[in-house]
Amino acid sequence: MAYTIVKSDGTTLTTIADGTINTTSTSLGLPGRNFAGYGASLNTNFAHIVENFADDTPPANPLRGQLWYDTTASLLKVCPSDGEANAAAWETLTATASGGTTSFGEVDVTGDISSNNLTVTNDISASSFSGDSLTISSSANISNASITSADIGTLTTQLITAGSTSSEGTLEGTWTVDGSVGGTALVLEANLNLANGNIILNDANSFFLPNGDPITFSGDYANSNVQAYLPNNTANILAPQIETPILTTGGNTTSGTLTGNWTLSAGSRLQATYADLAERFEADEIYDPGTVVQLGGFKEITAVEYELSDDVFGVVSDTAAYLMNSGAGDNDTHPPVAVTGRVQVKVVGKIKKGQRLVSAGNGMARGAKNYEATAFNTIGRALSDKTTEDEGYIEAIVMIR
């Protein structure tokens, strides 16, 4: 009668005919009923199981969960799936008795490591570690790990990070920076944000600016002198004088605010890269830069309607060197109208440099013909030639009417 061999999960592994031995379904020889050499086969199987198939290659026809002692790596390994012949795919099994010693080789930890005492002499790279005592030799490296709720007497490291420049971290307690005179004790490559509290400096010679220059203070250390040396801080800078070559909001499209009555000292001046002085006025529609406008419509300004209009008021600008009434609205609701200066103007027809510009209707200007220009309808004067009859833009010097 044939033997049917069933695996632990209830599936049938193989059926062995009488008088035969199966050597292809597992790493063992499975004798059938009345097989002549069954005693030798059973003893051989026992020996292989006791030594965990010790060899430099995995056993043939392994089953999932089968143990193999890799004599090359001196490690005990577990078969991950039936028939796995690739030694690198076998999982490494390492263990030791309490207080004993084992060689893990290279181990990837994917879960938590918990123990009463873990001594590491090479490297830890784990998602989490919890234990009563962790001892690391001077040559060890802890990377990509999180150590929480631990008391560390002395920590020697080249980097303490919250994970990235945008991640927040917290230092709690009273900290002392210990550095020798002439060496940099503290270098900040990121922002230092002070929400509350003070920075107490016991030795000013140990602190340096980002460019390497030492910080020298006079008087008592207080907000009036310390915060002036902290770039990008979120607290108010209380200083009688700030000397810096650049005062910026971070970009030419980022808004900033000056509060108070400011005066340029004798010989000082403000310079701008753009050329016109503009003021915001409420418009009845959204107008492109260069549109010629007049007072009227159901708001303050509207596009000029007629040729040679005496109601012409100015030109919409997007290059104001100085913008007045800036808080009245945005460019859609309250476009800037050039009060005076250089500005691009929507025009139609040929125009000569120096020619006076008058309204052409439909929000545009044109070159004035002889005796057409008056003190009331002149928009400005062209600063360049336009040689075509179609619509286009021309730079002109304008003034509000």
Image (cartoon, helix red, strand yellow):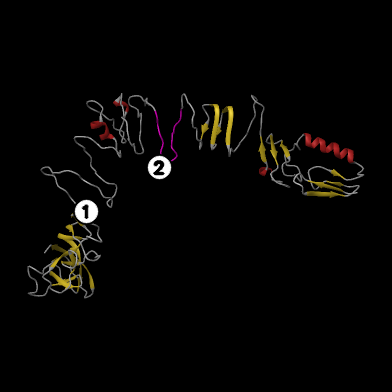
Name the mark nearer the viewer: 1 or 2: 1
The residue closer to the viewer here, 300 or 312, is 300
Q: Is residue 96 above or below residue 256?
A: above
Image quadrant where residue 357 sits: bottom left
Q: CA distance from mark 1 to mark 2?
A: 32 Å
* Range drawn in magenta: 156-172
Query: In the rendered image, which residue does mark 1 sit on?
Result: 327
In the image: residue 96, left or right of residue 387: right
Q: Position of residue 130 (x, y in %)?
A: 55, 31
Image quadrant where residue 45 sits: top right
> For the residue labelled by badge 2, is the local secondary structure a helix, a strand or a loop?
loop
The residue closer to the viewer here, 15 or 69, is 15
Q: Earlier in the sequence, mark 1 or mark 2?
A: 2
Residue ID at (11%, 75%): 369
The residue closer to the viewer here, 387 or 175, is 175
Q: Position of residue 274 (x, y in %)?
A: 20, 56
Amino acid type indicated by mark 2: Ser
Amino acid type indicated by mark 1: Gly
Q: In the rendering, which numbered label is found on residue 68?
A: none
In the image: residue 283, left or right of residue 151: left
Query: In the rendered image, which residue does mark 2 sit on?
Result: 166
Q: Position of residue 354 (x, y in %)?
A: 12, 67
Residue ID at (77%, 49%): 11
Image quadrant where residue 66 sits: top right
Residue ID at (54%, 33%): 129
> For the residue labelled by badge 1, is the local secondary structure a helix, a strand or a loop?
helix
Mostly what secondary structure, the magenta segment? loop
The residue closer to the viewer here, 6 or 366, is 6
Residue 51 visible in this rendered orientation of the protein:
yes
Q: Position of residue 333 (x, y in %)?
A: 24, 61
Disc 1 residue crowd, few under 14, some 14–19, many 20+, Cα 10 Å: few
In the image: residue 41, left or right of residue 136: right
